[in-house]
Amino acid sequence: MSTPARIRRSLLLVLGLLTLVLLGAPAAQASQPSSIPAVHQTQTAATIQASEFDNRIGGVLRGADGPIADVTVTAKGNGFEGEATSGPNGAWSIGVPEQGTYEVEIDEETLPEGVALAEGQENPRQVTFANTSSATTLFLFGEGIVSQQASFLDTLAERALAGFSFGLLLALSAVGLSLIFGTTGLTNFAHGEMVTIGAVLAFAFSAAGLPITVAIVLAVIGGGLLGYVQDAGLWKPLRRRGTGLVPMMIVSIGLALALRYTIQFFFGGATQQLPGSQSEIIDLGSVSISRNNLTSLIVSLVIILLVAFLLLRTRIGKATRAVADNPALAAASGIDVDRVIRIVWVIGGMLAALGGILWAYYRPGVSYNMGQQILLLIFAGVTLGGLGTVFGALVGSIIVGLFVEISTIWLEADLKYVGALLILILVLLFRPQGILGRRERIG
């Protein structure tokens, strides 16, 4: 069989695989109602506890004599109403089903005797937030006494914890992309769709009635299978033909578009929720984090440590590093370069799929273009750390994640991704090879 015919057959195999797996997704959308839309459909004012939702509005009520406890605060908007009571430290938090605009009001009848809102204070008031999981609002009491949010250090610690979790999530996908680049030199723009397919497969398997743990395992295996099929059917034949890296990069852009809209055709354009996407908020001293984000942090850290062990202590890991350093010399030393690259594609696909599942819980939600939304951040992590260096991808991704979340203290939430890309540009101006990359001579 000629090489072009083999390529066409393999592409059809990839699309056929996606078709078979995703056929159950449209039916799942109709049969599996989401708990969040239910709030909109009922249009009731039922009070829902903050622990049921990842998104939240909060603050700390503080007067001249200290914290103000036992004050009722309500939030209304988008067909939802939630209520909370300030605790002994004056803190209050209301979980909301989605980001947007809410009307927040203090029940002045519940204020302690002698405590009143300062003159001119807006109550109720509107609070709007997007692309971040939390928002705070301030109230003035008496003669300009401020209802303070948590101290700057507490806010910084909470944002840093969220950023570390997000950075490790990015690192899962970035490490896979870096492995592929290191061994093949390919800048794979279809890596975002490999992230998406992990979340979509997990949703499809869970909608078919499988426990979510089993669905996640099968989705990760499916991501590895997609990586195997891609390399066997497309990239290996192109490498054997001596196709240049720029044409292969253009092919990856076309593959990304084909996969993205194939997923959209079968999955649909709506955002769906994985089981357990709404988790309780866990207080860790002065900071808080959702259970899902904490689980994501732990899982990402364990998997990255396993990948590090694989690369440093196993034969296949040493062979992978040898191929990344010098493929010709590795082949002359008896290493099966094609086999190593195939294994790298499988591992990269599995890591991307797992990263997509964790990203679906972090957002939260599964959509056909979710991988595209963070593809630039993944590239930023890889480039910032050093192209082709796995540990550089880890370091770069953590820096990007930390900057994205911490920047929301000063920047509008809609600008936080722009800030991360700006820091990438600034670093590369002074260190073009990245943080852990090696300086190479060009020309």
Image (spheres, rainbow, N blue to C red):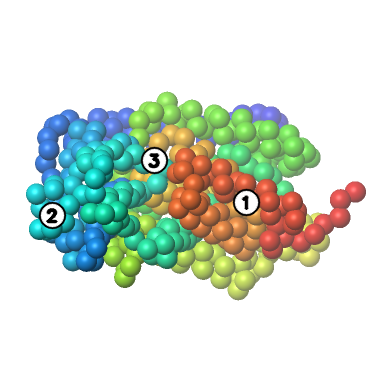
Q: Residue at x 35, y 35 (%)?
A: 271
Q: Position of residue 9 (x, y in %)?
A: 59, 31
Between residues 163 and 15, which one lies in front from this camera angle? Answer: 163
Question: Are the residues at dot 2 and dot 1 in contact (C-beta closer than 8 Å)?
Answer: no
Between residues 192 and 150, which one lies in front from this camera angle? Answer: 150
* Amino acid on which disc 1 is placed: Ile
Q: Residue at x 45, y 53 (%)?
A: 409
- The residue indicated by pointer 3 is 130
Q: Earlier in the sequence, mark 3 or mark 2?
A: 2
Q: Residue at x 27, y 51 (%)?
A: 140
**Is residue 439 among the parts visible in the rendering?**
yes
- The residue indicated by pointer 2 is 111
Residue at the bottom extreme, as displayed:
313
Q: Earlier in the sequence, mark 2 or mark 1?
A: 2
How many residues crowd around disc 1 within 10 Å: few (fewer than 14), some, or many (20 or more)? Answer: some
Between residues 175 and 255, which one lies in front from this camera angle? Answer: 175
Q: Is residue 91 above or below residue 75?
A: below
Instruction: Quarter of the image for the N terminus: give it.
Output: top right
Q: CA distance from mark 2 to mark 1?
A: 45 Å
Q: Earlier in the sequence, mark 3 or mark 1?
A: 3
185 lies left or right of 166: right
Residue at the right extreme, as displayed:
443
- The residue indicated by pointer 1 is 423
Q: Position of residue 221 (x, y in %)?
A: 45, 51
Q: Is residue 202 above or below residue 153?
A: above
Residue at the top extreme, as displayed:
265
